[in-house]
Each structure stands twice: as structure tokens, then as C-alpha cells.
Image (cartoon, rainbow, N blue to C red):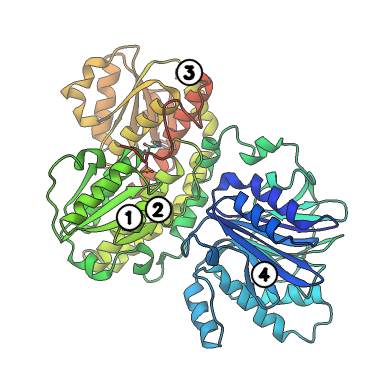
Amino acid sequence: MCGIVGYLGNRQAVPVLLDGLRRLEYRGYDSAGVAIVNPQGLAVVRAVGKLDNLTQATTDEPLVGCLGIGHTRWATHGRPNQRNAHPHRSGPIAVVHNGIIENHLELKAQLIASGVKFESDTDTEIVAHLVDQHWSKLTDVGKAEERLLQAVQLSLAQLRGAYALAILCEEAPDALIVAKNASPLVLGIGNEEVICASDIPALLNYTRDVIFLEDGEVALLTRGAVNIKDSSGNAVERSPQRIAWSPVQAEKGGYKHFMLKEIFEQPRAIEDTLRGRFSLETGEVVASELGIPVEIARNVDRVYFVACGTSYHASLAGRHWIEQLARLPSQAELASEVRYRAPVFTERDLIVAVSQSGETADTLAAVQSAQAQGAKVLALTNVLDSAIARIADGAFYTHAGPEIGVASTKAFTTQLVAMLLLATFLVQEREVLSKDASKKILGDLVEVPSLMRRCLSIRSEVQDVAKRWHQTEHMLFLGRGLGFPLALEGALKLKEISYAHAEGYAAGEMKHGPIALIDEEMPVVVIAPQDSNYEKTLSNLQEVKARDGQVLAIATEGDQQMKSLTEDIMVIPNCSELVMPLLASVPLQLLAYYTADFKGTDVDQPRNLAKTVTVE
Ligand code: M6R
């Protein structure tokens, strides 16, 4: 998501900030801005679109000064336009922010009541006003740097949510304050200069000595020193560490490919997608976050998903949850097919258009055809203000952050999370299940990030399986129930990046054709967690083995029976059946990734494929 850079030293800040922002471009953005402090005061310049526009704006209006902050914004709250671009300013204070302030509505109401006028639709502007209010009251603190630090600490105590912040004040020209909670922030320590950024590539031209800020910490940066405090205000001692990565490696966070980085970002992306969307205490999903008016949720007769590719596979799982939990008729359809059929929609249908990019031509066309028949459309997308989000009646945003690898990974699992939230919301509004049942689903979701971190820790086991099988030309994927969409997705991942021929099948369909393919040459990935389908899936697996097929199993940790059946086993932790697809996605993604990597294909930009498919 957004990129932050801050600089304090003896160089001119603007070129350092622009260079840093350029190195963070891979994070995705739709607008950018800088704020500079100099003896004349504070100057802010912002521009919509690419960094070239900001560069041009800073050339038209040259900004001189050695203290500054810069930002590339990837919109989450408020449209991507100039007034919502960062930095945000209040009096002498300027702020850049990456993350989501969960209690922004509540704080905004309080600030408005105290007479504050807002200039943007962002959650970030709140931080500028809070710091300004505290700054104004702390007149008895003598040193400007200390006063600013205290103003920020008091403001942070009021915030809930995720943030990486860089804050400056025109009356404190020798101080840059940074703070972090759940969003990344790294400090670069140079000679008489400090630079902070969302990621290491932005620092490497200036220093290789870095300090990673931890959650809850705030730091006062001056030319010669870094003064870190924990959330209780205690001083934290932390020595810099030396980074040996090249700039290109650094952009990928040290991972070999963006895809691998994005696979590993999933626990964080899921936390971001869940944050602020429900209360575990009450079991309530926050209606305004989901983009569906409550009356629609209460009166809908059918939930109809339209999507392409990976988003279609997520939709198949979504259909399963809507039927199972909300007890509503539900369908998942390929958008490219729907648009050329004569589908029947009614005003009581809720069409959920699932698209990571929000720009897919077929999905857009399917939405238009549903709207023409009076159906209500909810966009489920990762990109704010994208084409589908704009024409839909409401939008529910996943907060996966930009996905660079063509193969969808974190976009897929955050779509699954969003669909489970949607199903829980429908349960709530239609009073289908008890509050305790809703709490249980939400509790299961909250567990996912830490369980997923455990799945990621078996990366080398999956790599070993891929090593044994990467030369295969064909692979079959089988799954039942929620395992079926995963079988389709596992096969799609493998074929798109490794170019091996792969097919996903519902395990129960084996006997209706694909079993003819099984021989000693055919590896079959069986998604067989210990869920309610376990026994049946196990029978399918035995059928494969009986025909000398080679089984690669995705199984539950500790499943001894599975262990005795195959040495190619990729385990996931024991988990609730509902969230299993989120966890089982990880070994499937890693299997495709390592297979492609062993084959040496272009993992991030596979041949013939585009990340956003804006033509049919
Ligand atoms: O942006 P969308 O989610 O609408 O894209 C749909 C498909 O093109 C996409 O999911 C594609 O299948 C993936 N890149 C596969 O990994």
C-alpha cells in the first residue's frame, strides 16, 4: 500500500524524497506529495497520478529545505484525488500515513465538534489535527522537538488501527517524528542525516545501516540521533543493522520474486482486510464497511457471484459459505460466460462482482447486464475507485495492497476473507444463526493470520515436493466441498507460472472421466484436510494409488494415515473447516511457485498473461 519517506540532514530534502518514493513505486499508488520545512515555513505540494507529475510540480514551485516528508498514496479512504493526497496539514503540522485508522469516524466527529474543518475525506487528516491540537496546548514544554514528540505521543494514545506515520512541524525544524503500528517503517542512519521509509529500497542510496521500528514505538529523529520510545514512553535502545541486499533484492524484500513476497505477505494482508470490520465482543459485522445497505442485505433472495480466473475460484468458495451460513440460494458464474448468455436477474438479486483489479472487462460487462435488469451490485475489489467499484451500488474493499506478480495470491486469500465476512453479515441481518455462531465464525477468522504463518513455515517441505515433481508435464488436482475451488485454483496457479498442464477436478467427478488419466506417470495433488469430507476424499486418493498414480497430499498436521500413504505431504495446521481454504491455499501457491522456479520460468510475468485484463 502507500509509501512513506522522510528526510532530515544536510542535503536538499526534495530530491531525496522523490528518489525514495520512486523506489517505493512497486507498492502501487495513485497520487503523491511532499512537505518541506524551511525558514519561510512549511510548504506542501501534491499531485495526482504518477511521480512525474509531482516532480513537475516541485520544479514549477521549487521547495528548498533539508527537512521533509513524502508519500505515495494508494487510496483506501476517499477517492484518489489531490485533496486526499498526503501530506495532510493542520496549522504548523504535516503528516504522511500508511495504514488505516480504525476509529477515524469517532475521532472525526469529536474534532468537528471542537471546531476543526476537514479538507479531505481521509482518515489521515485526523492525525494532523490531533497533533496540532496537542501541540497548541503544550506551550509549557520548552524544546520544540520534545514538544512535538509529546504532541505525537498524546495523539497516538487516541488512535486505534494500523499506521506508519512521519510527522513534522514548521516550528521544530530539527525534528522528524515517526511512529509505527502494524504498518512497516524502517529508519536509515547516515552521517549527520536520518531517512525513514516504508521499505529498505528507499534508503539504500544513502545508507545501509538501518533500524526497524517495532509496533507501538515512536521515535524522535534529529540530525545526530535516533531516540526511540515504546508505547509506555520508555526509552528503547536498538543498534542499527547492516543491509547487504542489492536495490533490486530490497524492492522484493529480499525475496527472489514478487510472487513469493506476496505469498508471505498474506497474514498481514488478511489482518488489514479484517481490521475494523467487526467486533469480536458483540459478534457484529460493521455494515458500512461492507458497502451493502442493511435493507438490501435483509431483502435479498439470491447472491450471484460473477468473476474471472482466480476471482471466480474465490467466488465458488463464496457461494459455498453463503449457502451454508446465510442459507441463501447462491451461484458463482464466469463473467465471460454470463455476458453472452441470457441470464435472468431480479431486483432481489445481489450481484457480487469479484475482481482484484476492479477493471476486468468481462466482469464489468456482466455487471452492466445485471444492472440493466434491476439487480443490485456489490463490487468486491482490491482497488478503490476502480471501474467496477464506480458503477456498482456499493463496494467492499479487500486491503491486500498492490499485487505485482501476475499470479494472484494475496488478492485471492483476502477475497476469501471478504466473502466469509459477507456471509457473516448476511447471517446477522437475516438472523439465520445465533450471535454466538457469528462470534465463532469471526473468532475463526481472527485465528487465520497466525495459522497461516505456520503454513508458511513449511516452505522448505513444499520446495522438496516441487523439486521431486517439477519436471512433470501434467498434474491433476482433486478436492471436495471447499477443496474443489482450491483444486481449480491450485491447477491454475501451476499452469500459469510453470506452463505445466494442470487440471482441477471435484474429487467426486474422478470416476466420471479423469480416472482414465491415472497411471504411474500422473501426479495427483489431493486436497485432503481432516474435515467432514475426509473419508470420501481418502477413498478417491486410494483409487489413485490403486492405479499406480502418484499422490501429493495437502493434509492436516499429525495425520498419520496420510503419512503412511504418501511421502509427498504438505501439512496445514488443524483448523476450523470454514477457514481451511485460506490455509490450504498456501501450500498450493508454494508448490506452483517452486515448480516454476525450478523450471526457470518468468514467475512474476509469465508469458502471454497480463495482470489486468481490460479486453475481453
Ligand atoms: O482483476 P481480476 O480479479 O478481475 O482478474 C481476474 C483474472 O484475470 C485473474 O484472477 C487471473 O486469473 C489471475 N491473475 C490468476 O492468477
Q: CA distance from mark 1 to mark 4?
A: 34 Å
Residue 91 locus on image (x, y percent) = 67, 78
For the residue pair 420 and 132, the one nearer the viewer reads as 132
Q: CA distance from mark 2 to mark 4?
A: 29 Å
Please identify, in this view, whether the residue under mark 3 or under mark 4 is nearer the observer: 4
The residue at label 3 has a CB less than 8 Å from ligand 1:
no
Quadrant that contains the C terminus? top left
Q: Which mark is residue 518?
A: none
User: Circle 1 sits on which residue?
Assistant: 379
Look at 60% across and 57% down and name the residue there.
32
The residue at label 4 has a CB less than 8 Å from ligand 1:
no
User: Circle 3 sits on which residue?
Assistant: 468
Amino acid on which the number 1 mark rests in the picture: Ala
Mark before the other along the chain sequence, 3 or 4: 4
Question: How many other residues sit within 10 Å of disc 2, few (<14), some (14-19) or many (≥20)?
Answer: some
- Residue 316, compared with residue 64, is above or below; it is above
The reply to whether callout 1 and callout 4 are in contact (CB within 8 Å) is: no
User: Circle 4 sits on which residue?
Assistant: 94
User: Circle 2 sits on which residue?
Assistant: 386
Amino acid on which the number 2 mark rests in the picture: Ser
For the residue pair 499 and 570, the one nearer the viewer reads as 499
Residue 323 locus on image (x, y percent) = 21, 52
Look at 26% across and 67% down and name the residue there.
434
Amino acid on which the number 4 mark rests in the picture: Ala
The quadrant holding residue 411 is top left
The reply to whether callout 2 and callout 1 are in contact (CB within 8 Å) is: yes
Look at 52% across and 84% down and name the residue there.
112
Q: CA distance from mark 3 to mark 4?
A: 55 Å
Mark before the other along the chain sequence, 1 or 4: 4
Question: How many other residues sit within 10 Å of disc 1, few (<14), some (14-19) or many (≥20)?
Answer: many
Please identify, in this view, whether the residue under mark 1 or under mark 3 is nearer the observer: 1
Q: CA distance from mark 1 to mark 3?
A: 41 Å
